């Protein structure tokens, strides 16, 4: 299998490094890394159109693997990898992550990690978005080992081209996980605050911050992580509201 790794934390981030080290350990997969050269979190589905994309090759642990750092967004990286003919072969699977921090609920609409996996799915490549749902726990190995088990077992998650899967791991050792749950998106809302400050030459600027608030609804990704279970949420790029389509058809009969 040929696997493309990407992320939004940067080419040298510990999450993608752990994922590469674990997946490459048995020398069964060809692995490419095409990832942003630096931090690109919360860039969502943005792409670069008003400046060039520069790429910097980097050697990986195995000589037959291939690494490029890109001065763009996660979506840029996937587009370039699949459509820019920069890889030796088209990948069979795209894995975006492992992200530093959760990608849960409606937060996914801002996430560069999820955006990269969505781009892969839109381009017809099975894709996973993978996150460690903690800002305090920093051991990425349990999550990386979980992904390797999916690959070794040839899980159905690795073959869908109808959408992609968003996977979040609890911030604890794997032995403490309360199983795996197939979930729906929860509702997460930030109560944002904007702190006003003055730059040295007097220009005003704002620093955004906020507290996360979410509904405690059973069956959601948020609830699964709260209860220390691995959350797997199947997603797709079709945002159509089919229920309202049928209602509005009745309102606008021609």
Image: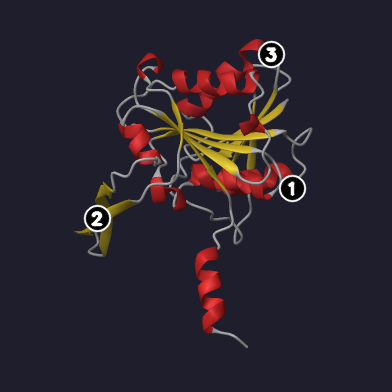
Q: CA distance from mark 3 to mark 1?
A: 26 Å
Residue 129 as seen in the image, left or right of residue 200 = right
Tell whether label 2 touches label 1 (CB within 8 Å).
no
Instruction: Residue 222: give x, y in percent of width and height.
Output: 35, 40
Q: State the mark number for residue 27.
A: 3
Q: CA distance from mark 1 to mark 2?
A: 39 Å
Classed neighbour count for the residue bearing mark 3: other residues with Cα under 10 Å, few (<14), some (14–19), many (≥20): few
Tell me where residue 170 sits by quadrant: top left
Q: CA distance from mark 3 to mark 2?
A: 46 Å
- N-terminal of the pair, mark 3 or mark 2, is 3
The residue at the point 62 percent across, 44 percent down is: 77
| Residue 71 in sight from this viewpoint | no
Kindly report which numbered mark, 1 or 2, lies closer to the viewer in this rendering. 2
Q: State the mark number for residue 191.
A: 2
Q: Report which residue position mark 1 lands on.
A: 83
Give the secondary structure at mark 3: loop
Q: Is residue 157 above or below residue 23?
A: below
- N-terminal of the pair, mark 3 or mark 1, is 3
Which residue reaches farthest front?
A: 250
Q: Nearer the viewer, residue 197 or 217?
A: 217
Q: Is residue 2 above or below residue 153?
A: below
Give the secondary structure at mark 1: helix
Instruction: Residue 237: give x, y in percent of width and height.
Output: 58, 53
């Amino acid at each position: 299998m040929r696997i493309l790794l990407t992320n939004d934390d940067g080419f040298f981030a510990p999450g993608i490094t752990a994922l590469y080290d674990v997946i490459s350990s048995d020398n069964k997969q060809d692995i490419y890394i095409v990832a942003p050269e630096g931090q690109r979190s919360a860039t969502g589905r943005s792409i670069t159109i008003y400046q060039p994309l520069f790429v910097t090759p980097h050697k990986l642990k195995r000589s037959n693997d291939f690494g490029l750092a890109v001065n763009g967004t996660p979506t840029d990286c996937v587009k370039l990898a699949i459509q820019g003919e920069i890889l030796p072969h088209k990948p069979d699977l795209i894995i975006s992550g492992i992200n530093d921090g959760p990608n849960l609920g409606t937060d996914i609409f801002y996430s560069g990690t999820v955006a990269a996996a969505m781009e892969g799915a839109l381009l017809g490549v099975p894709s996973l978005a993978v996150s460690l749902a903690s800002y305090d726990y920093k051991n990425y190995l349990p999550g990386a080992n979980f992904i390797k088990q999916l690959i070794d077992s040839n899980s159905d998650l690795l073959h869908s081209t109808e959408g992609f899967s968003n996977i979040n791991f609890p911030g604890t050792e794997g032995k403490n996980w309360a199983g795996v749950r197939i979930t729906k998106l929860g509702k997460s809302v930030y109560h944002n605050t904007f702190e006003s400050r003055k730059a040295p030459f007097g220009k005003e600027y704002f620093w955004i911050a906020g507290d996360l608030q979410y509904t405690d609804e059973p069956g959601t990704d948020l609830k699964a992580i709260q209860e220390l279970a691995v959350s797997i949420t199947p997603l797709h790029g079709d945002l159509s509201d089919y229920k309202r389509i049928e209602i509005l058809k009745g309102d606008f009969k021609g």
